[in-house]
C-alpha cells in the first residue's frame, strides 16, 4: 500500500461564498478519498471511476460558479470572467485527456494524477475563485 498525498482542507481555501465553499469542500473530500483508495488499488478501473466522478462533479461545480457569474454580472469584469471560464475549460479538457489515455491503456501514475488535481484546485480556488467571490460578496453587500 502506498500513501498518496492529498489536499488538506484549510481556511486559506475559503472564498466566503457559502454555496461555492460547500462544493469546494466536497471536491477536496473527493480528492482525499481518491488518494486513500488509489493507495490501496492503483488499477485502471479505479482510475477510470475516480476521474469520471471527479469530472462530473467538477462540471456541475463549474456550472454553479458560472451561473453565479451571470446572476451577479461578473461579465462586467470581462477579462477576469473570460480567464475564469478558460481555466474551467482547460481543466475539463485535461481530465478528458487523461481519461482518453486511460481508455487506450495509458495509465497515469496515481501520485501524478493527485499532484495535478491538488495543485490545480488549490491554485484555482486561491486566485481565480477568490476573486470571483470577492465580487459576489461586494454585490451582496450592495457595493
Ligand atoms: Fe472556478
Image (cartoon, helix red, strand yellow):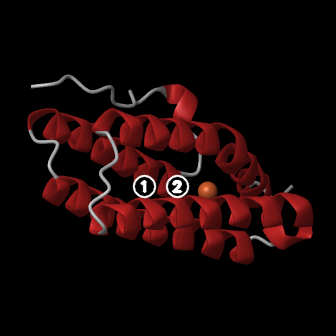
As helix, strand or loop, the secondary structure at mark 2 comes to helix
Q: Nearer the viewer, residue 19 or 39?
A: 39
As helix, strand or loop, the secondary structure at mark 1 comes to helix
Please tell me the numbered disc located at residue 48: none
Query: Is 130 drawn above or below residue 61 in the view shown?
Result: above
Residue 82: image x %, image y %? Answer: 81, 66
Q: Ligand 1 within 8 A of label 2's CB?
A: yes
| Residue at (44, 71) in percent of width and height | 60
| Residue at (24, 61) in percent of width and height | 48
| Residues at circles 2 and 1 in contact by the CB criterion of under 8 Å | yes
Q: Which residue is mark 1?
A: 23
Taking the image as shown, residue 49 lies to the left or right of residue 104, namely left
Ligand 1 occupies quarter? bottom right
Quadrant in which the N terminus is drawn: top left
Residue 86: image x %, image y %? Answer: 72, 64
Taking the image as shown, residue 49 lies to the left or right of residue 107, namely left
Q: Nearer the viewer, residue 76 or 72?
A: 76
Residue 44: image x %, image y %? Answer: 18, 55
| Residue at (56, 58) in percent of width and height | 91
Q: Does residue 31 appear anywhere in the picture? A: yes
Binning the other alpha carbons within 10 Å of mark 2 as few (below 14), some (14 to 19) or many (20 upward) gives many
Taking the image as shown, residue 23 lies to the left or right of residue 16, namely left
Q: Nearer the viewer, residue 132 or 143?
A: 132
Residue 74: image x %, image y %? Answer: 80, 67
Q: Quadrant of residue 67?
A: bottom right
Q: Which residue is mark 2?
A: 20
- CA separation in Å, label 2 and label 1: 5 Å
| Residue at (29, 51) in percent of width and height | 107
Quadrant in which the C terminus is drawn: bottom right
Binning the other alpha carbons within 10 Å of mark 1 as few (below 14), some (14 to 19) or many (20 upward) gives some
Amino acid at each position: 500500500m502506498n500513501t498518496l498525498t492529498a489536499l488538506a482542507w484549510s481556511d486559506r481555501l475559503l472564498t466566503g461564498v457559502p454555496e461555492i465553499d460547500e462544493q469546494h469542500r466536497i471536491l477536496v473530500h473527493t480528492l482525499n478519498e481518491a488518494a486513500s483508495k488509489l493507495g490501496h488499488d492503483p488499477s485502471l478501473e479505479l482510475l477510470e471511476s475516480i476521474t469520471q466522478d471527479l469530472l462530473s462533479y467538477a462540471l456541475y461545480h463549474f456550472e454553479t460558479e458560472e451561473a453565479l457569474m451571470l446572476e451577479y454580472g461578473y461579465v462586467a469584469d470581462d477579462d477576469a470572467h473570460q480567464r475564469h471560464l478558460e481555466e474551467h475549460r482547460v481543466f475539463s479538457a485535461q481530465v478528458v485527456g487523461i481519461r482518453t489515455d486511460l481508455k487506450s491503456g495509458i495509465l497515469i501514475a496515481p501520485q501524478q494524477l493527485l499532484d495535478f488535481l491538488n495543485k490545480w484546485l488549490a491554485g484555482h480556488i486561491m486566485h481565480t475563485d477568490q476573486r470571483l467571490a470577492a465580487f459576489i460578496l461586494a454585490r451582496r453587500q450592495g457595493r
